[in-house]
Amino acid sequence: MKSRLVEKDYYRGRARAAHPSLKSGEGAKIERSVTINRSPDELYSFWRRLENLPRFMSHIESISDQGDGISHWAMKTSHGRTLEWDARLIEDKPGQMLSWQSLEGADVDNAGSVWFTPATGGRGTVVKVAMKYSPPGGKVGAIMAKLLGDSAEKQLAEDMFRLKALLETGETPTTEGQPHGNM
Amino acid sequence: MRALCWHGKEDVRIEKVPDPKILNPHDAIVRITTTAICGSDLHLFDGFVPEMEDGDILGHEFMGEIVEIGSEVRNLQIGDHVVVPFTISCGSCFFCQKKLWALCDNTNPAAHENELMNGYPAAGLYGYSHMFGGYAGGQAEYVRVPFADVGPLKVPNGIPDEKVIFLSDIFPTGYQAAENCNIQPGDTVAVWGCGPVGQFAIRSAFLLGAERVIAIDDVPERLEMARQSGAHTIHANGTTFEELKEMTGGMGPDSCIDAVGLEAHGSTVDAKLDKAKASVKLATDRPHVLRQAIHACRKGGTVSVPGVYMGFLDKFPFGTAFAKGLNVRMGQTHVQNYMRPLLKRIEDDDIDPSFVITHRLGLNDAPEGYRTFRDKHDKCIKVILKP
């Protein structure tokens, strides 16, 4: 999927990043928008508290804010492996947008932005996420290529549905743990 | 607990499964006092609905007693007797706020899969495939009810289950089908299919002021029930269209309701072709009734479709619908809109919905109930189950 916006933003942010791990023109890009019945400020504040993100990003195990715009991310693959990286916030416009980028040594090189724009007709906020990522080579790279390459768009779509449900209702829909007949 | 589980085409069984638990703060657990088999459950039984999984618990018409509530449910208490709408709706999203409850954005855990098929996802439903979230259904002793603070209707003391159980689906479904016809004084409404939804569409059309209802089916006892509701009837055959035209002075019915859906059968050439194609998976649905309704409807009239369709329709007469400037209304029922007004109708004795019940079985006999209902044996029109 093409994304002019992430490109533009990525270049703008890159100049400020200390040690960006993802070179310009590299990586695969994905993006998606969803309209959420909440104000841009509420959504920005929720997202800016990075510890909130694993509540709807199902593949992210934890994010810890290390201060100074640096955060540490841990992700569990379907193979039970944990991938980790540090990321730096490279743009932060309260109530409007955030951009981040992984730092050198990341298991998954990635960069992304999220914009919060008032929706038409008083329908809340359009949340647009654009990401690019570049899995490393080797065995981890092969796992990541499978995990991210084939299903990154699906993952982002599912995460955005969960974000919307969480912010509009306070919970994400699930059937995990419900009864089921013998198979 | 005991629950009715789906294992494949024509294979449903009562099994011991774990009791449901609260999984989210807006959940409640309901001990089922009465549940029912819906005509749309037969589409699952007959293997017409994709994304079913081995062991899925069926059932989307049920009521019972609240036995546990989640931390965010403030309007219900343990011991409340409730009817639960089959559409799971959050109450907060754009669609719920527009009262389009069946189109809720936030209750389908499989939203993305549903979106891939339909462009945008529909609400979660109980026991109706993983396309609609795979929620365990209520043909069981207990069921988990998400957003219990939004959907369930508290039933006043003293009203027997049999009078209100159908507020969960088929009464609102028949009523919405009739409401979608925008019935005007003097109107004639034709209803294809005199199963339970058709029966409620007939009664609802009269409640909404239709002068005449013409019911079409090929099962004598169902036509008899329609006549008892005040409908004229046509025994479906090769001349249904001609009879309808004749009965309406050459003009056609003002509105036509397809209360049959994707498993229509008939004796005309197109119906036989549909059956042949569906059996070899060249088509997913058998839209014989829908074609006939579009053909028979008067110019500028309304075709209303409460019958369930799932996939791709072969030889849909779009040109006819266009030529006659028809309105076509359809979709899952926005049940929550109708529960309170229809409860009032029941309390006012305008209608006693238990008239459709022909079979009262224990939950353990549910598999036999599916077969009897599907095959229309023993003059079966509607089965309710008591756990």
Image (cartoon, coloured by chain):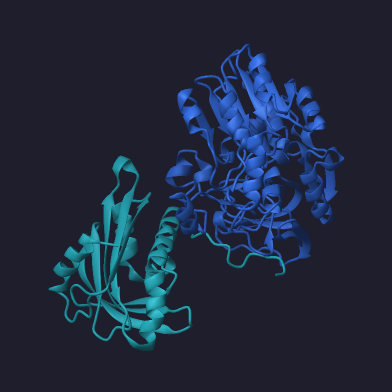
Chain colours: A cyan, B blue
Q: Is residue B347 visible?
A: no
Of all residues shown, which one is farthest toward the right?
B378
Locate the N terminus of chain B and report the quarter of the image it occupies: bottom right
> Where B326 falls versus B212 (above or below)?
below
> Where A140 falls versus B156 (above or below)?
below
Q: Position of residue A35 (x, y in %)?
A: 35, 51
Q: Position of residue B153 (x, y in %)?
A: 64, 42
Instruction: Determine whether, in the image, residue B187 is placed left or right of residue B317.
Output: right
Which residue lies at the image location 63% right of the left edge and 64% below the top edge?
A178
Of all residues shown, which one is farthest toward the left?
A15
- In the image, A21 versus B240, the foreground residue is B240
Q: Position of residue B58 (x, y in %)?
A: 69, 55
> Where B156 falls versus B87 (above or below)?
above
Q: Is residue B315 visible?
A: yes
Instruction: Determine whether, in the image, residue B361 is placed left or right of residue A164.
Output: right
Picture quadrant of residue B15: bottom right
Instruction: Determine whether, in the image, residue A110 is placed left or right of residue B278.
Output: left
Picture quadrant of residue B19: bottom right
Q: Position of residue B370 (x, y in %)?
A: 78, 50
- In the image, B180 versus B85, the foreground residue is B180
Which residue lies at the image location 56% right of the left edge and 54% below the top edge?
B132
